[in-house]
Amino acid sequence: MKIVHFSDVHIGVENYGRIDPDTGLSARLADFLSTFDEVVEYAIGERADLALFTGDAYKSRNPSQTHQREFAARIARLTNAGIPVFLVVGNHDMPLTAGPATALEIFDTLGVRMVHVGERLAARVVDTPAGSLQIVSVPWIRRSHFLASDERSGLNIDAINALIQDRLTEGVKTLAESLDPSMPAVLAAHVTVSSAVVGGSTRDGVRHGSERSMMLGRDHVLLRSSLARPQFDYVALGHIHKHQVVSERPMMAYAGSLERVDFGEEGDDKGFCVVELDSSLPAGSRLKSFRFQEVNARRFITIDVRLRSGDLDPTATVLEEINRQRVEGAIVKLGIEFPVELQGHLRDADIRQALNGAFYVASVSKTPIEQPKSRLGAAYSKGATPQELLRLYLDSKNVAEDRAAILIGRAEELIVEEV
Ligand SMILES: [Mn+2]
């Protein structure tokens, strides 16, 4: 049984893109739809038995009609090819209050054949071309939906989250134990798992990801052990945009988002998971293969150039750095740091031209940097000891040698005390 697990499609994210004057649509919409198309084409081409979506179809909980049409068109391509689809409701698909519809329940309302919506914590059996599969769904949980107001009264957010975490853990355990061990079973959840790396990583190692900026408030977090029940042959996760395998027994993975939302995801691979189960094996051991299939997501590139004083052609140095990167078709951020003496020596038109092939130039920043003015500065940057720095300072102030010796002696006492 072949399962294509994808997640966090987020149709409607339109930053870093221009509006096409002919269609009135953002050029970024085409990006998000085209990676989604890659998933659909893969599933059809490889004759997948199930397309499993772990939440966040849209950016907005009130997606535009265009966004809904494009999402539905791709779901229809899957089902028309005979591939059943399971959709877990994510936080972006869900209204803030309990009354309004979720962005996905229209499929249930219309009774669309072969489309199943996991809008609550529940287990159900889905028929696939390779036989039946049990799916336990854990949609996003909103405090106000999940707990009655009297249960929440008097509790702070941490206590409410703890209650939700306990309930979900207990609920998953009960559902897992109720499963038929003779039939394959997967868990499909839109949730943060405590050991997951939340952010993407940039080249400088700073972690900050779009999922963090797209998540509002403080959310409940489940322990890996809450989901890693032995009854599951695979645990499909959504919500965190960075693809990652959270555990291997049972195999538990975030598919990750299909497109990068911001520069925090510059270094992250984007794609979806392909999971094969062998239904003939015993419960919890049916995973035959797992792999990550990359998609052709729009690239984000940060170019940092630090010019040195005495550079005779700083523009050429910047262009060289730009040309070393693959800016063609990318969303680019350029940062130039230059010594103040080079102020006014950069040819902006040439730099703009070098960025012409980029899909979108997010920013070009030019920051003048002060040069070290004294010997102190030069020594400091070399990692001199505090004693050496003090010696330099006293020399620069022309302090008499005998007085300098006393001051250095006192300083050493203080430094030793501090250490
Ligand atoms: Mn989410």
Image (spheres, helix red, strand yellow):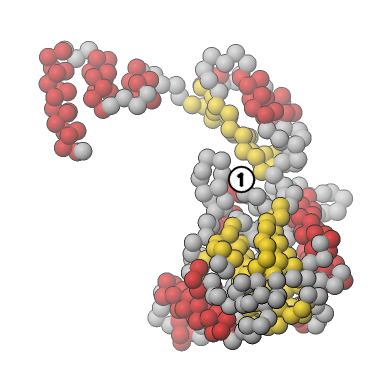
Residue 283's image quarter? bottom right
Q: Which of 250 and 357 is in front in this view?
A: 250
The residue that disc 1 covers is: 267
Residue drawn at 58 percent across, 48 percent down: 264
Does 95 sit above or below residue 39? below
List x then y, in percent, for residue 350.
71, 24
What is the count of numbered marks?
1
Residue drawn at 56 percent across, 44 percent down: 202
List x then y, in percent, for residue 65.
79, 67
The quadrant of the image that shows the C terminus is top left
Residue drawn at 81 percent across, 75 percent down: 129
Mark 1 packing: few (<14 Cα in 10 Å), some, or many (20+)? some
Amino acid type at mark 1: Gly
Residue 52's image quarter? bottom right
Is there any visible trace of residue 100 in the rendered image? no
Residue drawn at 67 percent across, 52 percent down: 270
Mark 1: secondary structure: loop
List x then y, in percent, for residue 385.
28, 26
Q: In this view, does 126 lie to the left or right of 314?
A: right
